[in-house]
Image (cartoon, grey):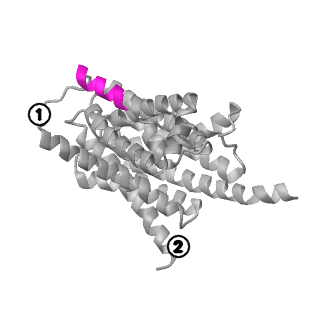
């Protein structure tokens, strides 16, 4: 099988599993505490990744420990980002939460550039500029229809809709900042598996505290077997997408991955229709098309800008 085909398969697997994650979490958290789920799954995954790193490359953990400010920052923003994601996906339509969170990320990268941080990204050409404008319009549109009660699902009244969309926006902002601090750890020799493990302890402690004090009370009673099953299913929908993405990067271009990722909202939309918990909303679908068009334009512009950059530097 050709490498390009293998890469496409891995990229599609990533998009499908990432979309499945949103729909699965959205349904699960209707009757299960997201903090309990987060504590179980991220405790297990953190132990797995840190343990593996300690066995294979302990110097990576020492490098993380020797950069305490970056380590504390990535833990803080991971705790905020994961909490926002876990709550938003249970309050509003999963396709909306997915799209708003993803759409905010490139806009946040531009704002970070304007603030003078080296990890930010400037708008490099008209394609990228127009694409980001359309992404912004898509975010505003999806936020408006959710608050107005025109989307497929809101778990409550107006204030629940406002809270859910606000948390989805915050999720995109915080996740962008997580990537920045993760890159800083990578530059000092901390590999991807180690980064994933060492950025979770603060969230694990917060989620454990939330479970103890009963932040999200549910009527569902769980025995040990149920807890083990939930943890196993949680690992099955969180870890494989990360692995698939790493495999895809090795075979296909960023452009290919970005274009396929832009299909994610539509896959979430179809999966939530199959699940049956969320009502069909043609207005939501319109917002997804606005986002998709902007994402394709922005990706095309980003790739054009990346290709031309070396040419200018060599002249």
Q: In terms of sequence position, does the residue under pointer 2 or pointer 1 come before the other?
A: 2
* Residue found farthest to the bottom: 1
Name the one closer to the observer, 198 or 124: 198
Relative depth, front residue between 6 and 193: 193
> Could you say where residue 270 lies in the image, as x and y percent from the top left?
32, 56
In screen coordinates, is 61 left or right of 297?
left
Q: Which residue is mark 1?
A: 221
- Dominant SS type (magenta): helix
Write the residue at 22% across / 37% down.
30
Q: Is residue 136 visible?
A: no
Q: Which residue is mark 2?
A: 4
Residue at (45%, 34%) from the top-left corner? 78
> Residue, x 13% and y 36% (percent of image)?
222
Mark 2 element type: helix
Residue extending farthest to the top is 213
Q: Which residues are magenta?
A: 204-213
């Amino acid at each position: 099988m050709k490498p390009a085909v293998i890469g496409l398969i891995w990229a599609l697997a990533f998009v499908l599993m990432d979309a499945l994650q949103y729909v699965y979490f959205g349904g699960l958290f209707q009757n299960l505490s997201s903090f309990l789920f987060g504590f179980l799954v991220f405790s297990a995954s953190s132990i797995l990744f840190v343990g593996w790193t300690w066995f294979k490359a302990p110097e990576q953990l020492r490098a993380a420990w020797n950069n305490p400010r970056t380590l504390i920052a990535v833990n803080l923003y991971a705790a905020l980002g994961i909490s926002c994601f876990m709550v938003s996906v249970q309050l509003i339509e999963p396709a909306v939460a997915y799209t708003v969170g993803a759409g905010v990320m490139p806009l946040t990268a531009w704002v970070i550039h304007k603030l003078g941080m080296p990890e930010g990204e400037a708008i490099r050409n008209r394609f990228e500029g127009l694409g980001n404008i359309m992404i912004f319009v898509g975010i505003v549109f999806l936020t408006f229809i959710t608050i107005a009660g025109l989307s497929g699902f809101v778990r409550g009244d107006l204030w629940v809709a406002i809270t859910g969309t606000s948390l989805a926006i915050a999720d995109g902002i915080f996740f962008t900042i997580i990537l920045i601090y993760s890159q800083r750890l990578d530059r000092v020799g901390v590999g991807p598996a180690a980064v994933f493990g060492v950025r979770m302890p603060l969230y694990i402690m917060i989620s454990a505290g939330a479970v103890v004090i009963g932040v999200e009370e549910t009527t569902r009673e769980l025995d040990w077997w149920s807890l083990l099953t939930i943890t196993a299913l949680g690992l099955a929908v969180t870890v494989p997408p990360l692995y698939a993405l790493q495999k895809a990067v090795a075979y296909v271009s960023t452009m290919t991955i970005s274009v396929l990722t832009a299909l994610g909202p539509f896959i979430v939309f179809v999966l939530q229709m199959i699940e049956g918990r969320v009502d069909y909303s043609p207005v939501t679908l319109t917002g997804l098309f606005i986002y998709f068009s902007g994402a394709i334009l922005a990706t095309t512009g980003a790739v054009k800008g990346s290709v031309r950059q070396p040419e200018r530097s060599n002249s």
